[in-house]
Image (tube, rainbow, N blue to C red):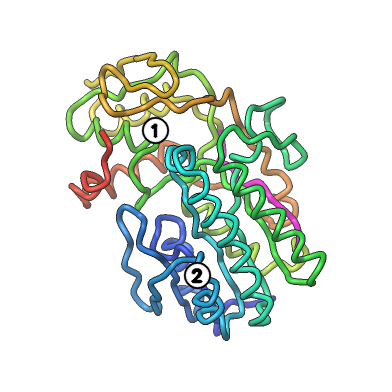
Amino acid sequence: MTDIKGRTVLVTGGRGFIGAHVARRYIAEGARVVLLDDLSSPNPVTIEGARFVEGSVKDAKLVEDVAEGADVISHQAAVLDMFKGIDDKVAELDVNVVGTINVLNAALKAGVKKVVYASSCGMYGQSEYIPQDEKHPKNPAWPYGITKYAGELYCQLYTRLHDLPTVSLRYSEVYGPGEWYGRVMTLFIKRLLEGKPPVIFGGGKLLRDYVFIDDVVEANVLATLNDDVNGMALNIGGPEPLSAARIAELACAIVDPSIKPVHDDPAPGTSSVHQPGRRRLVHELNDFVLDSSLARQRLGWQPKVLPEEGIRREVEWVKKHKGLWDVAARV
């Protein structure tokens, strides 16, 4: 595929954080965009210039109906909350695996020319080495990683078995304007804007991989247009690894340099003393840093937004949407 203009693109999860940004970019590129979303996101986004269909990827007939006439399917819909998957593994499997199979079956029937699947670095589990390339062993620490890896394997199977063009993008931690509340960076920003210190669990030195939403969107567009990556899985990581301590330092410098982080060390699965209700994730990962060189080589893609700029842009967005995170806040 050489051009998006004039194409019809179905974006599942199109009113969620990542899906909405992807949808807007396809619209800007001149595509006709259809959004399928069950509105389970804490803050569903309204997209101008797209047709919206309410419903779930669990509904095979509905997915088949909305995929009719589509040239591209951008499959972003998923249960993302780690705790939800731990608490209800079957519900997460229904959306993330069965839903993906429904999308692939619908794509086959509709003669779709490309399925771009939102996969996850969560499939790697504890790192055996860093940076982790696509050949790193797969040992997911949580049900979420298992479901995303299963979906990816189904995409590759459909490419081999049915000649359906698919590509899987293994996102690292995606952040930026519109991000749903609940992850570390959002927790830090929200507390700082309330005049409270961010709470760092443990020493805060473990490294994580963060990629800004604009860079993720660019990877989606390039993957849509590149037929040489069909059947492949590509890491989509950030420009540099970040520790929780570094994120807190950057966020404090942007919001209020007079506020200093505090540390807490709750046991896995228990709540923080400083933030009652905020639970520490079980089986916390050690360092994880993605090697995105394959995406650079095959897509000509690279992350461009540095953490200082990305966090500043997220803070500015939150300031303009005061109270939005309060609706979904657990703590």
Residue 192 drawn at (x, y percent): 24, 30
Q: Position of residue 61 (x, y in %)?
A: 53, 77
Magenta-drawn segment: 231-240
Residue 62: image x %, image y %? 49, 76
Q: Vertically, is 303 above or below 203?
A: below
Q: Are marks 2 and 1 in contact (CB under 8 Å)?
A: no
Determine whether, in the image, residue 290 is placed left or right of residue 317.
Answer: right
> Image quadrant for the C terminus?
top left
What is the total number of numbered labels drawn onto the structure image? Answer: 2
Amino acid type, callout 2: Asp
What type is the residue that disc 1 sits on? Val
Which-is-in-front pick, marks 2 and 1? 2
Report the side of 53 relative to 298 (left or right).
left
Considering the image in quadrants, where does the N terminus appear? bottom right
The residue tagged 1 is: 184
Residue 44 is drawn in which quadrant? Answer: bottom left
Furthest-right residue in view? Answer: 160
* Residue 59 marker: 2
Question: Which one is in front, 203 or 268?
Answer: 268
Q: Residue at x 75, y 59 (%)?
A: 156
Crowd around label 2: few <14 · some 14–19 · many ≥20 (10 Å): some
Dot 1 alpha-carbon crowd within 10 angstroms: few under 14, some 14 to 19, many 20 or more: some
Q: Earlier in the sequence, mark 2 or mark 1?
A: 2
Q: For the point 68% across and 38% down, which residue is it? A: 291
* Circle 2: element type: loop
Residue in view at x 66 percent, y 56 percent = 168
Give the CA distance from mark 2 to mark 1. Answer: 33 Å
Q: Is 144 located above or below residue 98 in the figure?
A: above
